[in-house]
Amino acid sequence: MSKRVLVSGGAGFIGSHVTVELIEAGYDVVVADDFSNSDRTCYDGVRKITGREDIPLVEMDFCDLEATRKLFSDYAIDAVIHFAAFKAVGESVAEPVKYYSNNLTSFLNVIQAGRAAGCKNILFSSSATVYGEPDTVPVTEKTPRKPATSPYGNTKQMCEDILRDSVLAYKGLRGIALRYFNPIGAHPSALIGELPRGVPNNLVPFITQTAIGKRECLSIFGDDYPTPDGTCLRDYIDIVDLAKAHVYAVRRMLDGRMEEDYEIFNVGTGRPVSVLELVNAFEKVNNLKLNYKFAPRRPGDVTAIWADPTLANEKLGWKAERTVEQTLASAWAWEKHLAGK
Ligand code: UD1
């Protein structure tokens, strides 16, 4: 019998791509989402891509403990992947209580309700933000975490700790935290992708919206960083590659192959790319000119961070495969799909 995976936040950007990969790998999936930062578009896209009309969708808020308990009793869940969380760095600085309350409560409820229902496998969606401004790059999982620079980042660190402590305390529970670098792009079908609300904070949605004419001009934040071309360096990871890492991690858990009951993996390419390089690659692969200008640094940005993905390569057997060009072409195809072009 196939194993069933609960994907909290399964209608969101990462959750929808993970749902596709899980289904294609033969897992049963239950999608749960409150649609606070998503809508049915990606859920419908997932059904189209997989040809599965019957993917259960539960509309609920994981801050509601009773609803979370009910979900775990309605479905026998073998593993949960927890994405449901707020994710805007700037907003978290302005509204810390909203972020701490939502991101911590929902995760605590998942652990609590899951445990009561006998679900022993929890995968947490963490972020490279936990490394802050690292002293050395690339970062390995052993690179010390720095104090978080935003309440959002702090919730990622705190949830990692909550998972680690829970695994230590509750016998039989296993946890994996995946630390994502910068997920970008869209599914090659252009049926699912990122759906930012309002003005995008992240680079690639801002690029694609500028190219389509929704935004006038991209501001490149800072051209005086101590990097080869003066712009920041990041590790941009294709969303489908990133989604596949979850399948490998879930399989490792469910097959009982974990070496420790709590494991952490970087999910990145190991390849630093500057903001300017990314913009140039976008123009080249999509054969267009982007309106951009240099602007002052954005407060809170780190100069350079990229992953050492060796651990995930070796232990999960996973490796990022798509090129930045392929990924940027997929991001543009998705933006055009949204615009009906
Ligand atoms: C941010 C978050 C990270 C989160 C990720 C989600 C921090 C410090 N950062 O990463 O936790 O997981 O988003 O994808 O917590 N840029 C521009 N112009 C723009 C937008 C961005 O030049 O209009 C530059 C930024 O200065 C940065 C790079 O592009 O150098 C990437 O920015 P962004 O996409 O926002 O991601 P991060 O800040 O790296």
Image (cartoon, rainbow, N blue to C red):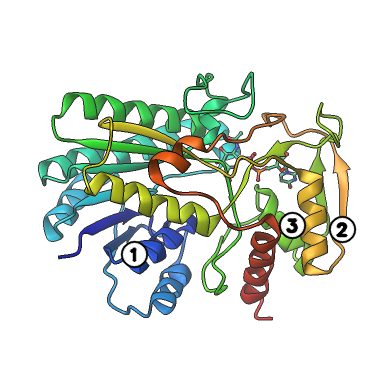
As shown in the figure, which amino acid type bears the numbered disc 2? Asn
Looking at the rendered structure, the secondary structure element under dot 1 is loop
Q: Is residue 326 left or right of residue 3?
A: right
Q: Residues within 10 Å of mark 1 (few under 14, many from 20)?
A: few
As shown in the figure, which amino acid type bears the numbered disc 1? Ala
- Give the residue at x 41% y 32%: 100
Locate the N terminus by quadrant. bottom left
Q: Residues within 10 Å of mark 2 (few under 14, many from 20)?
A: some
Residue 34: image tag: none
Of the numbered discs 3 and 2, the one sitting upstream in the chain is 3
Looking at the rendered structure, the secondary structure element under dot 2 is loop
Of the numbered discs 1 and 2, the one sitting upstream in the chain is 1
Residue 111 x, y percent position in the rendering: 23, 39
> Ligand 1 is in which quadrant of the figure?
top right
The residue carrying mark 3 has its beta carbon less than 8 Å from ligand 1: yes
Residue 25: image tag: 1
Q: Nearer the viewer, residue 254 or 151?
A: 254
Residue 38 x, y percent position in the rendering: 47, 60
Q: Is residue 307 left or right of residue 273?
A: left
Q: Is residue 169 above or below residue 241?
A: above
**Which image quadrant is residue 195 in?**
bottom right
Q: Is residue 233 above or below residue 240?
A: above
**Which image quadrant is residue 312 in?**
top left
Q: Are marks 1 and 3 in contact (CB under 8 Å)?
A: no
Q: Nearer the viewer, residue 333 or 245?
A: 245
Q: Nearer the viewer, mark 1 or mark 2?
A: 1
Residue 306 x, y percent position in the rendering: 62, 35
Residue 309 x, y percent position in the rendering: 52, 38
Label 3 sits on residue = 207
Q: Could you tell me how far apart the alpha carbons at marks 3 and 2 are, in whole angstroms? A: 9 Å
Residue 291: image tag: 2
Q: Do the residues labelled 3 and 2 touch (CB within 8 Å)?
A: no
